[in-house]
Amino acid sequence: MEKTLIEITDELRKAGYTEDFNLKENCLECRAGGFSLFHHDFQVDKFFRLEGETDPSDEVIIYAISALTNGSKGILVNSYGIYADPIASEMLEKLAFKK
């Protein structure tokens, strides 16, 4: 059985991914820390793709991200497919995932 969004984020938090990131057009913005990470400032350590069984709007990807600049680690949850946010090509390339 596939893990849920909550189960995955709980596991990542226990592993030290404590920041919450928001995706902006050309950067990741930390909700609590008041800083931004541009494509050259972070790496994607892991990702988890969840597919909605009946509703395409339930399709999300969860990224475990490490900042290269300040050592912080966090989580980005974002839709993909037709519901994905428009982002700069550098960010799209950095967040691209392989099936």
Image: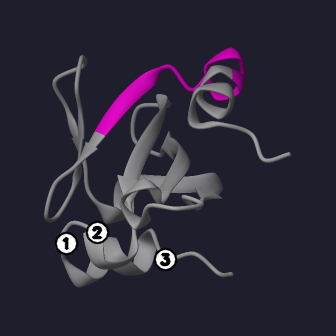
Q: Residue at x 47, y 60 (%)?
A: 59
**Amino acid at the residue labelled 3:** Ala
Q: Real-space Cα distance between discs 1 and 2? A: 9 Å
Q: Real-space Cα distance between discs 2 and 3? A: 12 Å
Which element type, helix, strand or loop, lies under badge 3?
loop
Question: Which mark is first along the chain, 3 or 1?
Answer: 1
Q: Mark 1 sits on what residue?
A: 87
Number of numbered discs present?
A: 3
Q: Position of residue 54 (x, y in %)?
A: 52, 62
Q: Position of residue 85 (x, y in %)?
A: 21, 66
Q: Mark 2 sits on what residue?
A: 84
As rendered, which of 2 and 27 lies closer to the eye?
2
Does the magenta portion include 15?
yes
Q: Residue at x 38, y 77 (%)?
A: 81
Q: Is residue 31 above or below residue 5?
A: above
Q: Which mark is residue 96?
A: 3
Q: In the drawing, does residue 89 fall left or right of residue 4?
A: left
The boundaries of the magenta stretch are 11-21
**Amino acid at the residue labelled 1:** Ile
Which dot, 2 or 3, sits closer to the camera? 2
Q: Position of residue 38 (x, y in %)?
A: 26, 57
As rendered, which of 44 and 50 lies closer to the eye?
50
